Image (spheres, rainbow, N blue to C red):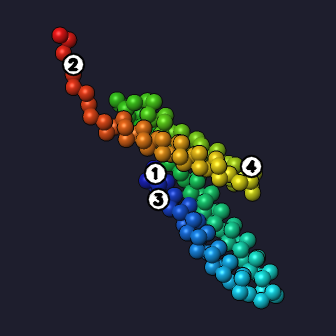
Amino acid sequence: MIAICGVGQLVGAQGGFERWIGISDLAATYSSAAVDQRALIAQSYLTLLDTIRSHFHEGQLLQAVGFLLASWALIHVPGFPRWLALVVGLPGVTSTLLWLGNSILIDGVPFFPYTLAHVLIFVLGANVALAVTLFRQPQPARSGA
């Protein structure tokens, strides 16, 4: 299930590629179009924007579920640090809040600063915490002399 959520995030990446290519193509078409065709191109922009947003929302939701499931699974692993399992769940919580804010509560409000904080602090922070904790060299046992 966690792997399915990870693969499902590619849908969000697809939205990014659609925005990058689609909006650039529409802008080029709009700038060279006749005046009577520009309204139709503007309408197709709105349709493309809805498609892009739906891909972003689906990727955000699958990211949230994936992190929360991973955290739940790690809590149940014997010997795994509980604090680290909870750190893995933090991006799931912030991703859920972003999904709620972007898709249900306040559509159209720019959430970029929150998204940037989510990625830089919580997602990268969880990865750094995992790497530092799991890949550091074990300390040799000290003798009691």
- Residues at marks 2 and 3 touching, judged by CB atoms closer than 8 Å: no
Instruction: Check disc 4 and give the amino acid type.
Output: Leu
- Badge 4 crowding class, 10 Å Cα cut-off, few under 14, some 14 to 19, many 20 or more, is few
**Residue depicted at 64% across the width and 47% down the height:** 114
Residue 25 can be seen in this image:
yes
Residue 104 is marked as: none
Distance between mark 2 and mark 4 Cα atoms? 56 Å
Residue 93 lies, in percent from the top left, at 58, 41
Mark 1 sits on what residue?
1
Q: From the viewer's perspective, tell me whether residue 133 is left or right of residue 61.
A: left
Instruction: Check disc 3 and give the amino acid type.
Output: Val
Mark 3 sits on what residue?
7
- Residues at marks 4 and 3 touching, judged by CB atoms closer than 8 Å: no
Instruction: Check disc 1 and give the amino acid type.
Output: Met
Mark 2 sits on what residue?
142
Of the pair 62 and 26, the residue shown nearer to us: 26
**Residue depicted at 54% across the width and 48% down the height:** 119
Q: Nearer the viewer, mark 2 or mark 3?
A: 2
Labels 2 and 4: the sequence-earlier one: 4
Q: From the viewer's perspective, tell me whether residue 28 is left or right of residue 11.
A: right
- Badge 2 crowding class, 10 Å Cα cut-off, few under 14, some 14 to 19, many 20 or more, is few
Residue 69 can be seen in this image:
no
SS for dot 1? loop
SS for dot 3? helix
Residue 105 is marked as: 4
Labels 3 and 1: the sequence-earlier one: 1
Residue 68 lies, in percent from the top left, at 52, 42
Q: Nearer the viewer, mark 1 or mark 2?
A: 2
- Badge 3 crowding class, 10 Å Cα cut-off, few under 14, some 14 to 19, many 20 or more, is some
Q: Nearer the viewer, mark 1 or mark 4?
A: 4
